[in-house]
Amino acid sequence: MNNKKEEFLANEKVSTLLFKLSVPATIGMLVYVLYYLIDTIFVGRGVGTEAIGGLTIAFPFLMLIMAVAKMLGVGTSSLISRNLGSNNKERAYTATGNNITLALGFGIIIAIVGLLLLDSILMLFGATEVLMEYAKDYLFIILLGSPFISLSLASNSTIQAEGKAKISMMNMVISTVINIVLDPILIFGFNMGIKGAALATVIAQIVWFTLVIKFYFSKKSTMYLKLEHFIPEPSVIKEIITLGLPSFIRQAGVSVVMVIINNSLAYYGGTIYISAIGIVLRILRVTMVPLAGIAQGFKPIVGYNFGAKKFIRVKNALKYSLLSSFVIGFIGFLILFIYPNYIFMMFGSDKELINVGKSLMKIVVLVLPIVGIHYIATEYFLAIGKALPAYLIGLSRQIFLLIPLILIFPLFLGVKGVFIAFPVADLLATSIAIYFLIKEAKKLKLKAKDS
């Protein structure tokens, strides 16, 4: 870390610091999340409610592709940063080349397995007879483009490891804009329907990877890649996968949750509920982005000042982060709770979808104002080097709480039980986060007095 950045983290007003660090993180995530939202809007308006359900069924498999890519990207980024820092440039180059080789290999394997077992996978993922064709049409094209999806996501992450965050973000923005422009052209203009949405995604990912490769073979990159760097190196591959595995488990866990939700809704509710949850979760992801952005901006502030024993600044960072997340969460809650019908109308004019969706949205967002605590607590404990509480808090909602509740509640409450599971899981997970934060706040108070 250079002196200028250290001075910034050590002396800048905490509230200003939090804003400056949170906004770029939020924008980067928002661009990515908005793409999937806009994609769904075009599919809903251009094809119909059942097509949204088809997207919802296929999405967990797309998330698995993304989970593999993220595993490779996270592992490689760590390897690159450390080896560039220690001036071991050759190993950094090998890690970059091996990352591309692995991403291509995994992408091809996923495509082959997915295409051979397509019907079985979609049945396992909760596809009803009505949704099967839509899900199949979409996922077939996504699988053909799987190598490029894997390559673009895995390799773009490594650009950030070189400290070129703006270039990484611009690649993502260009890809997203291309996707959004192509969606209506292919869905409406060429009358391709849901296949058009999938093709737009694949084309955008090909462009994204092309931009990444162009960067690596330009003077802007610190990497000097040769053919030998793409040859698999067992020790490098082992380190990439080991470092990236926790990220894969978290992302794949979300995919598993989605599969369980889809199957529960198919059994207790039917097609309309699967389409509704697809929209609800996409809207929620947009709402969660600022909360995750605050947590991301908060993390380096805490990490640096905790290490520097500036505990009052740590305490202030915690206070401002919690307050900001509550305000944003509360605004999101008001909008989604009061105007859910207008939100669902963006996705089409199906009255049944709007009526079902708005009632379910009101249930899912009930505890949205306090959900940010969960994000902040996770990043806080990671920042101060306490991995156990960080992982307990991080995994509590999705794995330990949401999955069991989704399986249990519908037995007594029917299809609404699936949706009631969301706020209950959020409330319990946030309570766990608060418990750990209160314990830590007491220790922090004593440390602040001593310092």
Image: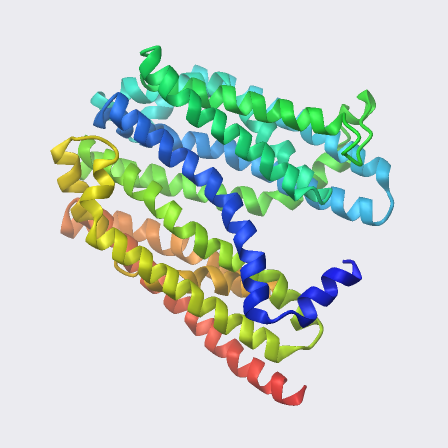
Q: Which residue is at a point 80% across and 30% down the rendered structure image?
A: 219
Residue 288 x, y percent position in the rendering? 40, 51
Residue 196 x, y percent position in the rendering? 38, 17
Q: Is residue 67 visible?
A: yes
Residue 155 x, y percent position in the rendering? 65, 32
Q: Going by the picture, which residue comes out furthest to the top?
A: 190
Q: Quadrant of the N terminus?
A: bottom right
Question: Image height check: is 94 above or below 327?
Answer: above
Question: Image height check: is 34 above or below 207?
Answer: below
Q: Is residue 127 visible?
A: no
Residue 410 x, y percent position in the rendering? 19, 48
- In the drawing, does residue 3 fall left or right of residue 31? right
- In the drawing, does residue 146 fall left or right of residue 345? right
Q: Which residue is at a point 66% across and 89% down the rendered structure image?
A: 450
Q: Quadrant of the C terminus?
A: bottom right
Of residue 424 and residue 21, the one placed in the foreground of this image is 21
Q: Going by the picture, which residue comes out furthest to the bottom?
A: 449
Indicate the colouring scheme: rainbow
Q: Give the tally of numbered discs.
A: 0
Q: Which residue is at a point 56% across and 84% down the rendered structure image?
A: 445
Question: Image height check: is 276 above or below 406?
Answer: above
Residue 20 lies in what quarter of the image?
Answer: bottom right
Q: Which residue is at a point 57% across and 22% down the rendered structure image?
A: 207
- In the drawing, does residue 206 fall left or right of residue 64? right
Of residue 156 and residue 93, the one placed in the foreground of this image is 156
